[in-house]
Amino acid sequence: MLRWLKNLMGGKLIEDAPVELDRCIDCEKLACSTREYEACVARKTHAAELTAMLQAEEGPNPSA
């Protein structure tokens, strides 16, 4: 059974969506080109905020 599933998937993995993608739900556009997605200031700002929040929760990195 597992061999059949592996053959069906062809070794492809499904990755998690970027966490900042939730900002796209608030946007009124139905779809963005790759260029628009990469240049989106709202998404980039939200990603930076999420990163800062996660780092604050983890505390200082003693190896840094």
Image (cartoon, rainbow, N blue to C red):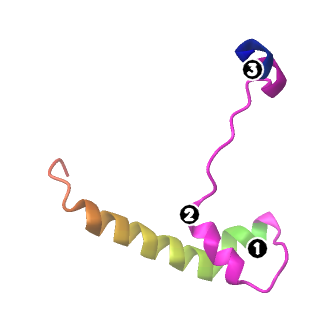
Mark 2, mark 3: which one is toward the viewer?
Answer: 3
Q: Which residue is mark 2?
A: 19
Mark 2, mark 1: which one is toward the viewer?
Answer: 2
How far is the residue under mark 2 from the one under mark 3?
27 Å
Q: Residues within 10 Å of mark 3 (few under 14, many from 20)?
A: few
Taking 25 as reference, is 2 above or below it? above
Which region shows up in magenta?
A: 6-34
Q: Is residue 18 magenta?
A: yes
How far is the residue under mark 2 from the one under mark 1?
17 Å
- Tell me the tag on residue 6: 3
Which percent across, then down, holds residue 8? Answer: 83, 24
- Is residue 51 rendered to the left or right of residue 63? right
Which percent across, then down, holds residue 22? Answer: 62, 72
Label 1 amino acid? Glu
Which percent across, then down, holds residue 58? Answer: 26, 60
Lower sequence index among marks 3 and 1? 3
Q: Secondary structure at mark 2?
A: helix
Q: Residue at left 79%, top 86%?
A: 28
Considering every residue shown, the one lying at the far left of the view is 62
- Is residue 1 rendered to the left or right of residue 64? right
Q: Is residue 53 magenta?
A: no
- Tell me the tag on residue 36: 1
